[in-house]
Image: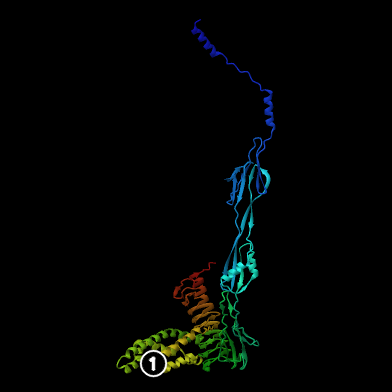
Amino acid sequence: MSIKSVLKRLLVDDLFREPSRPEPVLPSTSQNSNHSVQRDLAIVHGTASVRDGQVIVTDPINDGSYATIVIPENPLIQVYVNGERVEGETVVSRSHIVDIQFSSIQPRVSYDVVVSDDELSVSVRANVVKGVELHLKDDRVPKRRLKLEIEEVDRYPNPASPAVILDLLYKNGFHGVIDYPAIHRLCTARGTQQEVVLRGSPPRQGKPANLRLSTSFQTERDSLFRTVRLPKVAIGTTCAVIEPGFEGVPGVNVYGVPILPASTTPHLPRLGDGVTDVNGDIVAIREGRLVYTKHRIDVVPELIFERNLSSDDGKIEFDGNIVVHGSIRNGAIVKASGAVIVYGDIETSSVIGGQGVLVGEGIYGSTVISGHHQIVYDRLLQLLNRMIPELSRFGHEYALMIAHAIKRFDAHTTIPKIPGILFEKRHKRLAQMVEQFVDEGSVELSNIDPIYRDLRELIETTWSRNYRQNVSQKDCEIFLDKLIAFRRSLESSPTQRTVVHAKHVASSTIRSVGNIVVKCNCYSSNLESGNTVAIQQALRGGFVIARKSVYVTELGSPLAVETSVRVEDFNGFIRAQVNHPNTLLEVHGRRVRTYNTERNIRYGGSLQYDQDRDRR
């Protein structure tokens, strides 16, 4: 066999020969015993706990896990392990040095001074900011994952010395009575707290003199007019007593500045012509009705008629009250400085009452005026407001013309002509207003008002048509001063608010400086009030003027009879439950005419036109 054949056979045998399997090797007896010991030993994990503020760590045994600590998110806590700061969850070992550091907030207190608005007390506010100390909370149960818990302990400032607050008061220059218990409470305050620590001396108010009516008087009630009146008194009756007052005592504020008490100037009512002051007692000097208001006390004579009045009785004028237990009819003229009280009707007559007109029934075809003196005063005041500037210009031009005329060679003949030239060429309106000033007043007003009487006499003797061409500069100054004083007196005197009260009104003219009250209906009449008009049922036709407001239940007529209502004040208003067509409403120049029936209207005031229609 050749070498080539032998190699070929060897290769083929190697390809088809089954590989040989190794014999299994059995472990020895010593190796089996080592694996059995390892399975019998327990695995012990590492733990961590906190005792007395210290972290206690145990290491694991037999391949156990190491313990971890969880650090809370708090800027006041810093944890270091072996000198390196750690955060979150960190693995620890017994060999590690765990250092926990805390930052604390120190308590503090500051003081602020607060002075009251009236400067009669000083308060000190202690602004206390409490401190905080942190401690590691004990957790003695060992845990594989220990979450550190922090305890916060509040700390408060140590009690301050009262000298701190006293020194604060001294440096601010305060004076007064010191409240030491309040200072002690502030020094030991454990929170923000404010106390009054010093007080000034408030002024002790005095008492003004007061007028007290006699206790023996019993009021009289009138069921018809629902009024209450004081009784009639005889001459010599003590009507009231002036109770003396006393002055107040000044106080001192916390800066040591005196505080004056309020004025004790008595505001006693003016004494009328029917009473006088006798040693502090207000005594009646005539027989009549006692009248007492805030501004006036008087005894007013009363003229009583137990019958009807007519033109056959002539013109009746009386300085006092007129009481008619009947009616006023057939062209009668009745005028009283006090009140006119009529228990029946007023028919086709003229009635003037200085202190009001009360009518138990109706007013028909008549003229009724209430508070006629106040109406005259209102007109005079308006005239004075125009007259005083005009007279001032007259005096200024008079002085200017004299300054020029005095330089002329014929000054002695020129200067006397200046007043006439000024009246004729420059101040015709002043001459007209002077004459109107006399015409607006009356002899009756001159009798009751001495200031008006003096002005009237001055006009008649110096400024009337026959004498005004001879007025001098001195006359101008005197006249101007008197007019200004009269205007000041009118502006400061209380306004009378007299009333007209009636059940029905028809085809009449009524004027009142106060209210006008109609309990039932008002037909085709002209009403003018210085305050409010109230008509409790229907207002049909006519014209109504009021300064502040008008109240009507039914305004106008279903037949569209024209009815006009005007209110003068900017904030005035007109109210009606039913408003018929063809009514003209005006408030402070704002007008509206209605063409349909409306309900519950309110026109004027803050609401330009507010109506709530009844849809039921």
Is residue 503 or residue 488 the one in the foreground? Answer: 488
503 to the left or right of 52: left
Look at the image and name its color scheme: rainbow
Residue with the most extreme left position:
409
Q: Is residue 115 visible?
A: no
Q: Is residue 51 above or below residue 319?
A: above
Q: Nearer the viewer, residue 420 or 578?
A: 420
Q: Quadrant of the C terminus?
A: bottom right
Per the image, the residue denoted by label 1 is 472
Front in this rendered view, residue 84 or 364: 84
Residue kind at label 1, given as amino acid type: Ser
For disc 1, the neighbor class at 10 Å (few under 14, some 14 to 19, many from 20) is some
Tell me if residue 100 comes above or below residue 106 in the rendering: above
Q: How many marks?
A: 1
Relative image position of residue 518 (x, y in whole percent): 54, 80
Would you say residue 279 is visible in this rendering? yes
Quick one: 593 or 338, which is closer to the camera? 338
Q: Secondary structure at mark 1?
A: loop
Q: Quadrant of residue 89?
A: top right
**Left or right, residue 539 beside residue 158:** left
Q: Position of residue 295 (x, y in %)?
A: 55, 85
State the image coordinates of residue 402 (x, y, percent, origin top left): 34, 90
Relative to 215, is 79 above or below?
above
Residue at coordinates 44% horizontally, 74% vertically from top-left?
A: 591
- Residue 145 horizontal/vertical position (percent): 64, 43
- Residue at 61%, 63% (x, y): give it: 192
Q: Is residue 388 above or below residue 121?
A: below
